[in-house]
């Protein structure tokens, strides 16, 4: 189970579509739900469950309910979705504000749109949080390559 959380425009829904398509192409059963649909879900999926959240940030209305719903999932990976170019202070503030959701990984979106990846990488390093996926564009998403990311920010 992978839950995607983050602010509006971060790329949560696009990332879910790309991850779902990649897994489905590999023959894995994929179920996609919105966070609001979780209470009506009857049984555990036999495959990959992808959960999309509404826009969330520290102090957002519905943050407590989102934490409660994500907390009902058995061992979810909660990915905080951040766009490339996000400044480190803004990313750290977002991570702190969403701590109740217990994000366990970062998902970097828009990496092909800018060379400014350092802010998101700084947040990941300081928080000790791995980057799970990197989306270069809307359709190009892959598991994160640490060495590849490092080469992009260091000469």
Image (cartoon, rainbow, N blue to C red):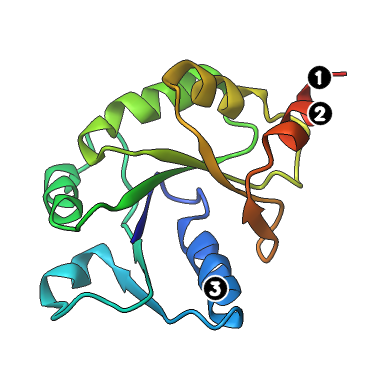
Tell me: 27 left or right of 55: right
Tell me: 2 left or right of 25: left
Q: Residues within 10 Å of mark 3 (few under 14, many from 20)?
A: some
Q: Element under label 3?
A: helix
The quarter of the rendered structure image containing the C terminus is: top right
Q: Is residue 21 above or below residue 127?
A: below
Residue placed most toward the observer, 112 or 61:
112
Q: Position of residue 10 (x, y in %)?
A: 50, 48
Q: Which mark is residue 154?
A: 1
Q: Element under label 1?
A: loop
Q: Which mark is residue 151?
A: 2
Residue placed most toward the observer, 42 or 117:
42
Tell me: 140 left or right of 128: right
Q: In the rendered structure, which disc, 1 or 3, sits on the residue that comes first in sequence?
A: 3
Residue placed most toward the observer, 79 or 57:
79
Q: Are marks 1 and 2 in contact (CB under 8 Å)?
A: yes
């Amino acid at each position: 189970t992978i839950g995607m959380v983050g602010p509006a425009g971060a790329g949560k829904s696009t990332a879910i579509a790309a991850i779902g398509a990649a897994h489905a192409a590999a023959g894995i059963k994929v179920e996609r739900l919105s966070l609001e649909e979780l209470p009506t879900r009857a049984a555990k999926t036999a495959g990959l469950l992808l959960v999309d959240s509404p826009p969330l940030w520290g102090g957002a209305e519905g943050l407590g309910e989102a934490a409660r719903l994500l907390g009902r999932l058995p061992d979810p990976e909660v990915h905080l979705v951040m766009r490339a170019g996000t400044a480190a202070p803004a990313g750290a503030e977002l991570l702190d504000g969403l701590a109740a959701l217990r994000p366990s990984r970062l998902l970097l979106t828009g990496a092909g749109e800018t060379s400014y990846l350092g802010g998101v990488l700084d947040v990941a390093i300081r928080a000790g949080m791995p980057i799970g996926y990197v989306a270069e564009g809307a359709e190009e998403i892959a598991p994160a390559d640490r060495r590849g990311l490092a080469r992009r920010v260091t000469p």
